[in-house]
Amino acid sequence: MTAISLDDFLISLESAVGSSTETVSAADTPALCALLDETAVKLARDHAFRKALGCAEPSLWPLLRKLWQMLYRAHQSTAVGSSEENIESPQTTSITHNSTRVLIFSLSRFTRNVVAGVASNQSKAFANEGEIRGLIHLYTSWTFADDPEAVAIARMLTQALSNIITANDTLSRALWESYLDLPEDQVILIRLLSSTNGKLALPALMVINNCITGSHSRAQLILDKAVGIRLCILLLDKMEATYEAEEGTEEASAFDVGYSIFTHLVEAGVVFDMYGKLSMQDEIITPHQTVLLKLLDSYLQSNSIAPEDVGSMRLAEKLCPFFGQCFFGLSAYAQRAIGNALSSDPRQSGVDPHLAELDLMLPKVCEALVLVSQCVTALALFDEAQTNLHKLCVELRSDARMLDEDIVEFLRLLDRFLPRITFGRPAPGPTGLPQDKPPQTQSATGFTYLKRDLVRLLGTLAYACRPVQDRVRKCGGIEAVMNLCVVDERNPFLREHAIFALRNILHGNVENQAVVNEIRPSSEWGEDGMLRQDPTASVLK
């Protein structure tokens, strides 16, 4: 097919749309769709053609505006005048007429392509935002949830909307502010992200990403409005659902765009308040807060903090007290719950032992503690010659207890509460004697890696830091760490991390080294090959 010229396109479009008053006739629709589709292909690959078409005479924009208005009016009686509950089915309403659907799809694709990378075209096409939004709202109703054609139309409409505001600060601000002020049931981004059809998530996330990119003030708006908090929750839900998506799939692309949004929110300093707004009364940690911690952990592990970047370091310095507050709050809850479990006597209380022994929130709290520990460790590992992050982490405290002291006490409790698993069976306790039956902790979910990451954090804090080394000695931390130099299937590489932590605690500290030297083996091999207890030995307790 011969490529259509600019003049031929405008003449053909004027002929198809210019004389119409209410809608395009069904007879004219196929030709108009073919015209829009053919031109859209050329627009997609020819930036100069996009610019030329945008400023050509006669003007494209009044014709495009008229076409959007006609299509929207054809739907308006159902979309606005009737409730969704009164829509009988897609097959029995005028809005599902095949020719109308095809025309909406073609017009959306044309609009998407004509505005790409041309600011003047974006500004003129933005006049149609209301009609585009109204059609997206309609085609994301529950009536069309299982209609693949409706999903395809909603997807293309959203792509057009996204391209209209891409890299256009003025339009992005106007759209973002207006959407956040709408009633929740009118916000198309919520409807798109709430859809059970995963194909609608990616274009919706692209709209959000375009809205907040390059503007901390627009990122901050997401927490100032109830609609924004709802979007945050949906964003976290989508990212959790697509976290393990196969590379190259649309789900993986959705995660990447979602992560880009999250990065903007982190760098705008929004996540601190977001964590609080995701809380629920009487719950120490919520599922969405846990997802947020997972993303923060990924952010820090990906070397997103650059010591040479002033803004990046300011963010890191704010993250230290944030994680400290999280750690102490979660740790206090966990230690209290574990203490209650260890001291509970269900025979006296008359309560079911399973319920009396284990706080049902404890696994979730421990899962969050693993994430927070990893985040603090990542911050503390930055080169001290370039940053003061290690010092900030070392100085974290709650009331009279420093972070390292809290970790030692927690590790002591965990050693009683979670017997190490060796070759599938609980190992002997720290005294070498059989352990008492532990509380009901058969499910390792939530407790996995907890000891390992806590002892790793302790070792990181103790590195070349005499105050931490001394505090660890005074609170009995050396013995606690030595007890962890064992194999534990629930905590892979626990022994290696404990040995490394012990090295950092002892390095250059004569007093700490003396503590270890005073501890003698509790038994020794005799000449007859028998292992005999040494009554004069010091035993780790």
Image (spheres, grey):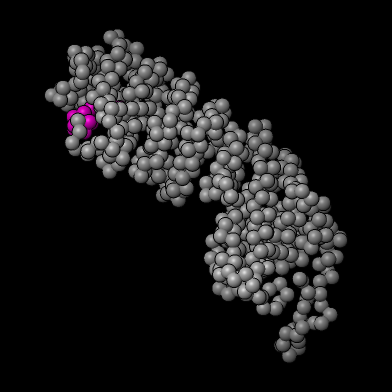
Where residue 407 sits, quadrant-wise, is: bottom right
Inspect this view and state whether residue 88 appears: yes
Look at the picture and state if 49 lies above or below 200. above
- Residue 506 x, y percent position in the rendering: 80, 60
Residue 94 lies within the magenta run? no
How would you classify the magenta stretch by its main secondary structure? helix
Q: Is residue 13 left or right of residue 328?
A: left
Image quarter hosting the C terminus: bottom right
Q: Is residue 290 left or right of residue 80?
A: right
- Residue 309 x, y percent position in the rendering: 65, 33
Image quarter hosting the N terminus: top left
Q: Give the range drawn in magenta.
A: 95-109
At 28% from the left edge and 20% from the top edge, which residue is drawn? 69
Where residue 518 sits, quadrant-wise, is: bottom right
Q: Which of 218 and 80 is in front in this view?
A: 80
At 44% from the left edge and 28% from the top edge, which residue is drawn? 182
Q: Is residue 273 left or right of residue 479?
A: left
Inspect this view and state whether residue 204 appears: no
Q: Which of 14 and 441 is in front in this view?
A: 441
Residue 108 lies within the magenta run? yes
- Residue 37 x, y percent position in the rendering: 24, 27
Where residue 493 sits, quadrant-wise, is: bottom right
- Residue 85 x, y percent position in the rendering: 28, 38
Q: Residue furthest left?
A: 27
Q: Residue furthest bottom?
A: 528
Look at the picture and state if 491 lies above or below 406. below
Look at the picture and state if 86 lies above or below 469. above
